[in-house]
Amino acid sequence: MKTKSRRLGKNTKNDLITYGIVIAAFVVAEVMQATGSMSSLLRGLLVPLCMYSILAVSLNLTVGVLGELSLGHAGFMCIGAYASSIFSVCTRETITEVWIRFPLAILVGGIFAAIFGFLIGIPVLRLKGDYLAIVTLAFGEIIKNILGSVYVGYDANGVYVSLESESSLAMGADGTLLINGPLGLSDVPLDANFIIATVLLLLTLFVVLNFMNSRSGRAVMSIRDNRIAAESVGINITKYKLIAFTLSAFFAGIAGVLYSHNLGYLAAKSSNFGYNQSIMILVFVVLGGIGKMRGSVIAACILTALPELLRELNDYRMLIYAIALIIMMIATASPKANAFWEAHSLKKFISAKKENKPAKEVQ
Amino acid sequence: MALLEATNLSISFGGLKAVDNFNIKIEKGQLYGLIGPNGAGKTTIFNLLTGVYKPTEGQATLDGTVITGKKTIDINKAGVARTFQNIRLFKQMSVLDNVKVGLHNHYKYSTIEGILKLPSYFKKEKEMDEKAMSLLKVFDLDGEADYLSSNLPYGKQRKLEIARALATNPKLLLLDEPAAGMNPHETAELMDTIRFVRDEFDMTILLIEHDMRLVAGICEELTVLNFGQVLCQGETSQVLNNPQVITAYLGE
């Protein structure tokens, strides 16, 4: 079976290139940091870059692999951020070792987001296309608005939850306020760093890429391509849709963990967990190429870093950003550009060289 | 006992009786044809047999177990596979992957095993690849295994659909106009392939077709449908010479 081993090899090779790019970028960033040639602005961007890459890859699992348009991805990120931050704040005294506490926080954030992804997925995935997009958008907003206005505190008698004000919690004298309504959590431990963020990005890519190459991934893609045919060959539509959606929410939750543990505080606002954020992530996915994980990472990095790096240009910043968006769109999606990349690809360049060599020897 | 037996199968959409009192008996290993003018209800019968529609009356049994009323995937697991009139391939997936989706329920490993690439993943994937390639070879598609399925020429797409249906290891194969859009040469080739599939896989095949050469050439028995009702049923040569059938097709 020569064809088969070749094909399996091609997938693995492609995946390895993706991991390689991430690791290479990590090494370059580390060297720049060590030699002091990195500006503080860029240093502050390192963890967000990984975070947005994870978000883009996880949304691409829903949009590109499952083929359903979800506009509520920031909502899952919000759940992950809150669940993990509450966990970290509560266990700060009991688990002093960061290397134990933070992985646990990541798991808590991811699992909570996955649970919500599963529960929301059950009704939402019955819908299709535009309807699904609108309902996920609504769910994202609901999550953000609830978490952005809830007051949670605890004392010796138990946990108190209120949507009105801190005083309405009516805690005892020993009560501690956990979530202060719109002000959120103010003292989240700064556990996230660039190394962990990169490891998480690699982990996300590993899981998503392997999933795509597996039996379950094929089932999900078959649903995307033709639901009726998938059903006719015995694919359980609901099950595989839910698996993909839940997995997608899980990694969005992990990105949320990075978000809050990098900033040190957490408050759900329109600017960080609103629909603008969801659409931003969708822009990464679309510009990076739907269904292409490597493209998602690259697009997320460029489009996150660009506005920050152009900050000096003040008024022209968003103008240049818009032009960059259009150029990226043309470069990745237009047929002419695709033909250009094909003609000038590295592979072709190498094979052309190989062909030229014997000709030269003859001369 | 017949492999497929439908009794009084009926369905109506609103006031329209799309299929009325449909009866059929197909023995194991038979090549059975279902013909009739456009709109006669042929594809509706396929949809009834595969659980896309639920019949308003009557039932169908496969090997003695009732299949009507079950879900599509359960009917597939029970042993009915089909192709579609308007080809429904997984267009953005490779030819090989299309067949491997068909093998989904026969080579199992869990999602976790797939994500972690445990040894069982490699073992099952290898078995799946081998099985899929051997199926593709039957249809002379093994050279195109890595192609995107949408890039195949029309005739090969039809063959791939049959290969994918066979991958689910069915007892009964339903082919919906397998020769549609094929030239006479391709049709002749397809006839050989269908015969080969029947002999090689010991398959029972029910097919819908408008190409009378194909029907006359390979089907052993025919049912003619007109306006949702059975017009005539029996051996191919007799049915095709029946004056009623000729009238339904060609007019008075």
Image (cartoon, coloured by chain):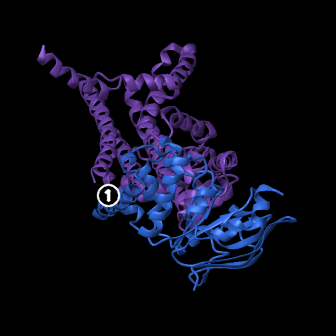
Chain colours: A purple, B blue
Q: Residue at x 69, y 69 (%)?
A: B239
Of residues A357 and A113, the one drawn nearer to the viewer in this rendering? A357
The residue closer to the viewer here, B83 or A86, is B83
Instruction: From the viewer's perspective, tell me whether residue A151 is left or right of residue A107.
Output: right
Mark 1 crowd level (few <14, some 14–19, many ≥20, 10 Å Cα): some
Is any atom of residue A81 visible in this view?
Answer: no
- Give the left or right position of residue A121, taking residue A311 as reference: right
Q: Quadrant of the N terminus of chain B?
A: bottom right
Give x and y (percent) for residue B172: 54, 71
Residue B237 in the image, given as x and y percentages of width and height:
64, 68
Residue B129 lies, in percent from the top left, at 35, 57
Q: Name the one closer to the observer, A286 or B68.
A: B68
Amino acid at pointer 1: Lys
Image: A352 above or below A313: below
Specify the quadrant of the image occupied by residue A117. Answer: bottom right
Horizontally, is B127 left or right of A314 in the view? left
The residue that disc 1 covers is: B117
Residue A345 higher or lower than A200, as above or below: above
Compared with residue B212, is residue A19 higher up or lower down, i.e. above or below? above
The residue sitting at the right extreme is B15
Provide the chain ID for the residue under circle 1.
B
Residue located 33% across and 58% down the image? B116
Q: How many marks?
A: 1
**Is label 1 in a helix, a strand or a loop?**
loop
**Residue B202, image x and y in percent?**
45, 72
The image quadrant that residue B39 belongs to is bottom right
The image quadrant where one finds the C terminus of chain B is: bottom right
- Mark yes or no: residue B119 visible: yes
